[in-house]
Image (cartoon, rainbow, N blue to C red):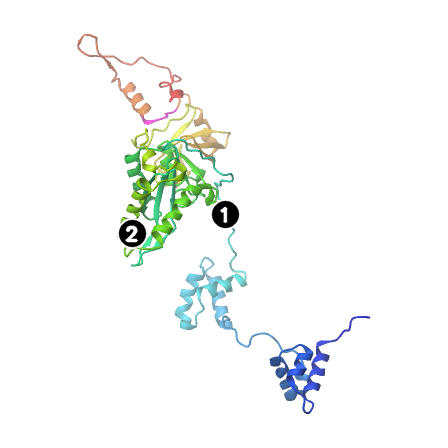
Amino acid sequence: MPWEECRAMSKKMEFVERVVEPGAKLAPVCREFGISRQTGHKWRKRYLEHGFEGLEDESRRPKTTPLSCAEELVAAVLETRDAHPSWGPKKIHQRLRRRFGEQTPSRSTVARMLRRFGRIEDRRARAPRSLVERPPNVCASKPNEVWTVDFKGWWRSHDGSKCEPLTVRDACTRFVLTVTMARTSVGAVMPIFEALFRKHGVPAAIQCDNGCPFVSVRARAGLSRLSAWWVSLGIRVIRSRPGCPQDNGGHERMHRDIANEVEDAPARTAATQQRILDKWRQEFNHVRPHDALDGKTPAELYRRSERSYHGPLEATYPPHFMVRQVSRFGRIKLQGESYFVSASLAGHDIGLEQLDELRCRVWLHRIDCGELEVLPQLIDDFVPQVPTRTSKRFERHDARQRAGRGTTRRSGGGAAMNRQPAPRSPAEPIGNLSTQ
């Protein structure tokens, strides 16, 4: 038997003819046609007022659109944009507010108008320069081999202060080195690490995520000012994958303890909260036994690092490298030409290795910082007749040799006599630079 075909209009006409009959009840007829009583009342009312023409579907467009703007406002937005192509929604909104007052559309509405009429386009997100695709291979077999660092998710104290502690722990012994509330900036975090290095020594490696201020994914090698400073101290930087907290799972587990024991009962003020965190760290390190440590406390196993903190190490590079110090603006100079390298490397001596006629590779100690394009006439400077300096120590040595300040003393306490350095050819190297 073929399917029964019917049109909606014919069903409506059949329905209203049934409900307008004398003595007809609306509810049973609505159940028979499978519609609600509200819909039945609507079609019955339209039929009685307009006849069968009232059964036609009306436009579903809203009668009012609160977010729509008058044509005059739209034209004013577009005219302002055309007159000032560099102005964005914020400046256009401020300009029109002087003219239209309270009737001026909001900044988001102005942005929507500009986007709808093709005056602005969404910017394409720039891909980060430095990404970590593989999970880090971290194995800490002794204290200070790997430190793990991160910022605990923030909460607020009762007075509204933001509490976001910086946490540092030893991966081998679980010893928590610090839980200090600080801002997520290099200027706030670097003094904390310097105090830790002076107290506990320098670790072999530091593991961190890709957040600020530890990493800058848009910078060369992902180095921020903080991590570049770590590299200058001889510390290996281990980065986790983006969006993968499990790469630093032990540290995140410690954060859960802070959340359960400290964050769930916030203090009255930030100063009180810091004292509570210090007390929690003392108990975590010296009182609480850990199953992973065979029931021992972290303080029983942790020892100070054998490497003491003496500031950044002297940068040494092979003789065929050119060495330049990065300015505070992140630039270097080669034969009068200025090249931008990275603001994160400001103040550091970097090595430049020639690759071909237009490219050289940038090194910070043992870290490959990518390639730098240079002008062709500067390539000759990469293979000098005299090897370039590798550190300031060799510069001072060369200056003393040129000034004739070298002296020797006779054995037995005789008077000192000056000895002028023997002349050397321009191709003779200054010391054994390859071993530095």
Quarter-wise, where is residue 6 in the image? bottom right
- Magenta run includes residue 130: no
Q: Amino acid at mark 1?
A: Arg
- Magenta run includes residue 391: yes
In-image side of 400 versus 119 (left or right): left
Rate crowding at label 2 as few (under 14), some (14 to 19) or many (20 or more) other CA atoms within 10 Å. many
Mark 2, mark 1: which one is toward the viewer?
2
Q: Which mark is residue 49?
A: none
Q: Amino acid at mark 2?
A: Gln
> Horizontal and vertical percent for residue 410?
21, 9
> Horizontal and vertical percent for residue 347?
34, 36
> Horizontal and vertical percent for residue 249?
44, 42
Query: Which residue bears the numbered disc 2?
Result: 273
Residue name at image x 31 percent, y 12 percent: 422
Residue furthest right as drawn: 1
Q: Nearer the viewer, residue 135 or 25?
A: 25
In-image side of 52 versus 118 (left or right): right
- Where is the N terminus found, in terms of image quarters? bottom right
In the image, residue 180 above or below residue 198: below
Residue furthest top as drawn: 412
For the magenta stretch, what is the residue range? Answer: 388-392
